[in-house]
Amino acid sequence: MLPNYQKLTFEAGFVVATLITPRRLRSTMSDTDGTETVRLSVPDMDCPSCAGKVTGSVGSVEGVADADAQVTAGRLVVDYDPDRTDSAAIREAVESAGYAVENGGEETLSVPEMDCPSCAGKVENALAGVDGVAGYETRPATGTVVVESAGASRSDLVAAVEGAGYEVADPAGDDASAAGVGAPDSVWTSPRALKTWAGAALLVAALVLHFSALANPELFAVGSVTLTVADVAFLLATASGGQAVLRNGYYSAKNASLDIDLLMSAGIVGALAVGLYLEAATLAVLFSVAELLERYSMDRARDSLRELMELSPDTATVVRDGEEETVPVEAVRPGETVVVRPGEKVPVDGVVREGASAVDQSPITGESVPVEKGGGDEVFAGTVNEEGYLEVEATAEADETTISRIVELVGDAEQSRTQHEQFVDRFASYYTPAVVGLAVLTVAVPPLLWSAPFETWFVRGLTLLVVACPCAFVISTPVSVVSGITSAARNGVLVKGGDHLEAMGELDNVAVDKTGTLTKGELAVTDVVPLNGNDKADVLRCAHGLERRSEHPIAEAVVDYATETVGRDERPVENFENLPGKGVKADVDGVTHYVGKPGLFADLGFDLGHTHLTTDGGAVVSDDPADDGPVVAADETGGICEDRDDCLDLLGDAVPQFQREGKTIVLVGTEEELEGVIAVADEVRPGASEAVARLHDLGIERVVMLTGDNEGTARAIAERVGVDEYRAELLPEGKVEAVEELADDGVAMVGDGVNDAPAMAAATVGVAMGAAGTDTAIETADVALLGDDLRKLPYLRDLARKANRVIRQNVWSSLAVKAVLAAGAPLGLVSVAAAIVVGDMGMSLTVTGNAMRLAGVSPDDE
């Protein structure tokens, strides 16, 4: 975790209850291959005691193997033996515990071969006929189907999908396969590919015989049809290359799906029926090759998601009963100690208990520099231990780690449909029937009305059937969205949906919270001004001695800086007294010292309009890298004393200047002497001003800073980072009003994801910063910057703009090609082969390849 990560706070009672309540209930029944899983939504199960009642009731059902109550999600995941119970009995058990089950439980099915819109259509039609299905969503870009079940079992859903002609991957397999993400190279050696290559070889041989001067003897006659050697080769090529096409066409007809498989099957069968063997073989083989290429392209698009899945190791070294034991990462439970040696990946989310090391967090946060980790620091699954030995206490199970949530949310992102995608879907619903109707008219009208050659117009109609396939422009948007969102996730930016990515590229305004976003959210010493002959060390040692007894945030900043700069002051401190609203006082070495506001020293009788700087070695020590020089210079303060030029008017000069820079000052001294001035401030994040400037370069018209801080501090930070305007002293509702004013032209609200939740909800896009490991921010924000680098915001803007540009290119280019082919086919200007190679295979490859360019967009481009 970054040094300044944000932490959520919970009520003490909730934390204690969470620690003493078992999250998972296991029966004595061991897991077997025959168990099934049902996921139930139980929104009222929102506390550990609720979870205890629910799991206790469900655990009493015979046949339940495992009940996992996920309180933060309001979800219950139950593994059960379908031979001994069913999902209905489990629902009744939950309801008998006093909790309503919301329709419905969620089932995710991995369907690797569902990689095109027509495939998804068949699956959807099949699921629509299953009793107990409340809703479903197909995601061709990731090969998954998400079903909202209202009583349907997993076996019912699997049977329906398989009835549509698609195999459901085994959920017990590895993560990659379980998500429908296979190795792209396996496409070329699959059974379908081998049949296609055989069909292609037969087609080439048949073409040679058909068009060359070689002998092409007649072999036999079937009724009145005489078949030559070439004809037989064409038929064999059709059977070999078109077997999968015809099979899919059968399932399309069975599920009443007017899709490309049905159209191609109708074309092949029709061509065979009228004796056009060459056209049938060409259509079967070329379309099968196009399908393989489309599947390969889609698998390449899924590569990035598979890489995310493979970040976390499969095994972990756990200390049990004093012995190290290597176990599957799924077997590690919260509270167990995991050993991570140099060069190994951290297998689970957890907290370092022993050891120290630099950890490469780039897979999670996108940081390029390893982060030092020691006792009490948080680490994430999938990050790499660079050099040291670490013992990590696990804080989450394997399926609840940050990287697991990221993979899940990236997969879910496909369900948030962009405006472009909605337009394409609406257009496709009219386009395909219209072109099919045109194909029918092309085949029927000329021969009937003008006695034109039927064979000629049949081929032209067949070509239109190929053109009627909308696959290229239907996949043009989702493949671009998945590519862009996965690219962002690899660089530490989690985008929750394509609609948010699209909006981020089109909005004109950005509102940014100050504390914790533009600034670090932690006070730090920025300046030390020694006075009256004291040096910097004197001032800091005195301040350390007194402030270490105080719990004020300013005191903590002073103590940390003093300890780092001059070390701890071990002198005895006696008679410590807190002076409410003013400061503190105590005796150090028998002398009473004070640390506090200027008003405290004014009450002690000091003339704050006239004091003297220490000039040996420089009057001011500044630790603010943005300062160009001393805040108060000795040669600028003369004129009060006739014989000295080191005079300083604290109230008239120094204090106002510090306040203009957003700094707070405390004075250090005794009852007799002012020893020095210490200035503290919430430091601006490195790269904040660079991020604001880059946002302007990327088309953002207004960057507005929102803060509840005072006017002076707000003005100083605003000038420092270069925002266009700022609004200070805002309550939460004031931030909401400010965001709503900017919303007409689209606005992103950037905050911590917790305190700024109302303003983020009112924005076009809510962006949470520093969200790694923060459940609330990851779950509630539209976009989460997983690190604390604000420069990821312009990277996101750049990626979003490029994604929108790629989507527009894909949609309009594929539509243009289809329009040209549709116009040329009835005129005989487009052949069947050209329609497949250019309109289907060519455009599918083109839009996928164009979308994959988004994977190359990185923060380094900024």
Image (cartoon, grey):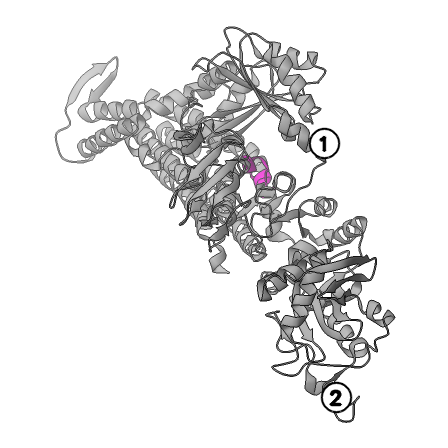
Give the residues in magenta.
Answer: 412-424
Residue type (three-letter) at the residue carrying disc 2:
Gly
Amino acid at circle 1: Gly
Rendered image quadrant of residue 698: bottom right
The local secondary structure at tag 2 comes to loop
- Outermost bottom residue: 643
| Residue occupying the point 16% across, 21% down | 218
Classify residue 70 as left or right of residue 708. Answer: left
Report x, y in % for residue 66. Answer: 54, 17
716 and 269: which is toward the camera? 716
Alpha carbon separation for disc pair 2 and 1: 61 Å
What secondary structure prevails in the magenta region? Answer: helix
* Residue bearing the label numbered 1: 13
- Figure disc tally: 2
Q: Is residue 248 above or below residue 479?
A: above
Give the residue number, with chain letter if any, for mark 2. Answer: 638
Residue 701 in view, yes or no: no
839 with respect to 647 (left or right): left
